[in-house]
Image: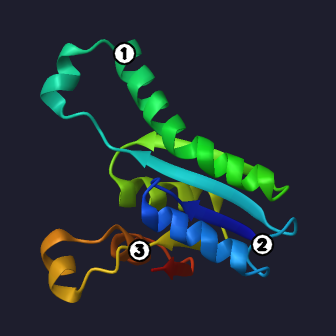
Amino acid sequence: MKILLAVDGSPYTKRMLAYLAAHDEWLGAQHEYILVHAVPLVPPRPASVLDKATLKSYYDDSAEKVLKPIRTFFERQGLKASCVSKAGPAAETIVAQVARSKPDLIVMGSHGHGALARLVLGSVAAKVMAGTKVPVLLVR
């Protein structure tokens, strides 16, 4: 099974990885893993005064801070995972990667906000579920 893991380095990502480690059916050599991280965009005004190399370096460094410990987690499990990081809004980045990778399952950590908070703030998980037909496993 091809499993796409949406990661952001938050405690919710750590909880998701702990869940996977505790459930043999989700973590094993029989699966292919794709780690996806959306790096938040630098606001337009500050970005306009930075050269492209500096901006790329910032995005690469930000992604590496999140992905390195997760790659280490997979290496300790004896598993391989491919990593994808893109600068942009999280939900749109994840949905675009789902379209490219065509996974069988998406796994995400969720903050577990209530309905009112989702209405006001939106939810990356809700946007991903609305933007794809691939099953989503939310870990709270």
Image depth: mark 2 or mark 3 in front: 3
At 17% from the left and 78% from the top, the residue drawn is 117
- Image position of 76 (left or right of 41): right
Quick check: marks 2 and 3 in contact, CB under 8 Å? no
Up-down relation of residue 43 to residue 81 (above or below): above
Closer mark to the observer between disc 1 and disc 3: 3
Question: Farthest residue in the bottom direction?
Answer: 115
Badge 3 density bin: few <14, some 14–19, many ≥20, Cα 10 Å? many
State the residue position of label 3: 110
Q: What amino acid type should be assigned to the residue bearing mark 1? A: Thr
Question: Identity of the amino acid at label 3?
Answer: Ser
Provide the residue designation for mark 1: 54
- Mark 1 or mark 3: name the one nearer the start of the chain: 1
Instruction: Give the labeled residue for mark 2.
Output: 1
Secondary structure under the numbered disc 3 in the rendered image: loop
Location of residue 134 with respect to 10 vertically, above or below = below
**Residue 62, x across and y down, in percent:** 43, 35
100 left or right, relative to 81: left
Residue 39 picture location, percent across and down: 39, 43
Which part of the image, by quadrant, shows the C terminus? Answer: bottom left
Mark 1 or mark 2, which has the lower sequence index?
Answer: 2
Separation of marks 1 and 2 at Cα, in angstroms: 38 Å
Q: Nearer the viewer, mark 1 or mark 2?
A: 1
Bin the neighbour count of mark 2 within 10 Å (Cα to Cα): few under 14, some 14-19, many 20 and up.
few
Q: Is residue 134 above or below residue 59?
A: below
